[in-house]
Image (cartoon, grey):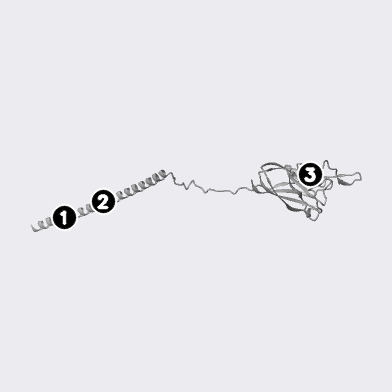
Amino acid sequence: MEANETIKQNKRSFVLVCSLVAVIVVGAAVGILLVETKHGKSSTANATDASAGGSQQANAAASSGVSSPDPSTSSPQQTSAPMQPADIVLGMNNLLLTNGVAEAPPADPNSIYGTDMLQDQHAMNPNGQWAEAPVNGPERFAEWTFASPGGTYQIIGTYAAAETRPLTLSVDGTVVFASAFSTLTGGWNPQNRQSLALGSVTLSPGTKLLRISCPANQAFPHVKEIKLTLITTS
């Protein structure tokens, strides 16, 4: 009898313990489920708030007419310096017309004076010597044409002269310098050449005719080239 009671009591204790364990397990599971549910709601709320904030910013930008730059397509603006026009050089290779002057010397390619400049035109005289050729008309001259974008130019003459042989420099028939190339350079040879500023002139845009000349009874200095450098544009 007592043994049976003891067995029954143990069974009741075991059942009670199992019930308590079941309650604890179920409670823990319910607690975990509640925590996960709360966390999911919080994440959803944050995502919703972020989406709403982005939409508000986009709406604000659209209403103000300002669009956000796209870093993948935007590039820094580059500015280039304006190109400086090249110098205009008038020399032997672009002569238009001459009278009484020619590329020197016509008969001696080994002349000590050089072969890349203008001097008085020469011809063989009856005595078999080279002498100045007769000049047709009242002037010796050389002419060039060039295109001007318009502006003020500095004019530089490169030449050699052991004596004073001034030239008149004109553009389109208007005298610019009445006594150009008049400074002595110390000799007639290439090593005596100097590049000297003759002055400045303001020209309108278009094709221009530049002429250097002297009376027919006067000799030319040994002119290598005339250079026009643009100072300011018009």
State the residue position of label 2. 34
Q: Nearer the viewer, residue 5 or 135?
A: 135
Dot 2 or dot 3: first in sequence order is 2
Q: Which mark is residue 141?
A: 3
- Of the two numbered discs 2 and 3 in the rendering, the one whose residue sits closer to the viewer: 3
Callout 1: helix, strand or loop?
helix
Name the foreground residue: 4 vs 154. Answer: 154
Which amino acid type is shown beneath numbered disc 2? Answer: Leu
- Left or right of 72? Residue 153 is right
The local crowd at label 3, few if under 14, some if 14 to 19, many if 20 or more residues have their Cα within 10 Å, is many
Query: Residue 107, position in %: x, y?
Result: 84, 46
Q: Amino acid at mark 1?
A: Leu
Coordinates of residue 173 in the picture (x, y in percent): 74, 42
Say which of marks 1 and 3 sits in front: 3
Residue 123 in sight here: yes
Amino acid identity at mark 3: Phe
> Image quadrant for the C terminus?
top right
Tell me which label, 2 or 1, sits earlier in the chain. 1
Pointer 1 residue: 16
The CA span between labels 2 and 3 is 110 Å
